[in-house]
Amino acid sequence: MPLRPIRGSPRTWQPGHAPALVVIPLALIAAVVTADLLAPPHIHLGPLLVAAPAVSVAFAGARLTSLIGLLAVGAQMLIGVYRESLTSANIDAQIAALVVVSALLVVFCLVRDRRERQLHRVRSVAEAAQHVLLRPLPRRSGPLRIGCLYLPAEEEAEMGGDLYAAARTPTSTRLLIGDVRGKGLAAISHAALLLGAFRAAAHRLATLPRLAIHLDGATRWDSSQWRSASDEDTDEFFATAIFMDIPDDESVVHMIVCGHPPPLLFRDNEVTTLRPKASHLPIGLGGMVDAIEYEVETSPFETDDLLLFYTDGVIEARDAKGRFYPLAERAAAWAKDDPDEVVRKLRDDLLDHAQGHLGDDAAVIAIRRGGPATKPP
């Protein structure tokens, strides 16, 4: 998941940056001056010159706006000289009004640019923090090639309640994909807790069930540590998830599915949904049963096979007619591509299907087994 350019950067103007837009206020000044000079003496079009600096505010900064304002004032004085009435009260009033309006527009530009710079700094810090939290997955891990995709539903956001992470053990790659209940800052906070707990424990040699128990316990402890007896009706924090362990030297994938949509396996020209024999409760709801016993599902994962893990934001995306996104059907056309290319095409096709707006966060992990294994550092 490469870093994206920071949005909302301050408005700056450089020569040649937007020549077509700069022409607009200049053309307005020229048109008003020409029309006024050709009009009868009793018709005064000079007040229309205020449109030039007003238009400049839409795309220019304070300097260019002040320059356009000065040109407009100069044009008004030119009209007064041509009509031999520069010292008349009417022309003086028009010039004074144009100076005042241009000055106010310049002040507006200064205030706007200052606020945009502040917003830019805030977004820069927020995006840096979010990218540290939701780190891109490695493109190679042992014999695996990995591609990942994250599409937040919230406009201007970089992260929501969906999550993924990876960790290396001496003999395998472990991955997590999950979807936290809810949206907004609370979901991001809970996703951060799960990611931290996974990264702290996944690299150890504990079994996959013990890893799931660790995350379930951390989740339940975090939601209950501040709860008093009067808060029994407080909403529970839980997340659907899939834990994966993919050995380097064995053509299988071990999984524990906790209420999460099942992954897809692409082999040759066939698509298989790896439906678990036992789907466990979402992470964070383990306290509803007396003892947690996670069952590991093992499925073949051969060389050149492609595994596709996803959150429900992908398959629940709707088009204009309310139809869900046909993930298995669309992804089958790209199953031979590199995982990075698979998620790129999936992103474009998913956004096109949903008319550019998702109703929920969407995360995807594409994994292909192939090539020589690389030793972890």
Image (cartoon, rainbow, N blue to C red):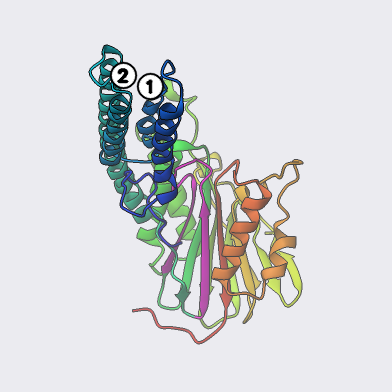
User: Residue 265: where, in percent of width, then height?
Assistant: 68, 68
User: Dot 1: within a 10 Å radius of its alpha carbon, few (fewer than 14), some, or many (20 or more) residues?
Assistant: some
322 left or right of 297 in image? right
Magenta stretch in the rendered image: 143-167
User: How many residues crowd mark 2 within 10 Å: few (<14), some (14–19), many (20+)?
Assistant: many
Q: Name the residue furthest bottom.
A: 372
Task: Report which quarter residue 168 is drawn in.
Answer: bottom left
Asked whether, in this view, residue 97 is left or right of residue 31, the answer is left
Gap in Å between the C-alphas at discs 2 and 1?
Answer: 6 Å
Q: Give me the disc on residue 24.
A: none
Please name the residue that numbered disc 1 is placed on: 47
User: Are the residues at dot 2 and dot 1 in contact (C-beta closer than 8 Å)?
Assistant: yes
Q: Is residue 99 left or right of residue 334?
A: left
* Secondary element type, mark 2: helix
Question: Against 239, is 255 above or below?
Answer: below
- As shown in the figure, which amino acid type bears the numbered disc 1? Pro
Instruction: Tell me if residue 101 is in the magenta stretch.
Output: no
Which residue is painted at 58% across and 74% down in the image?
338
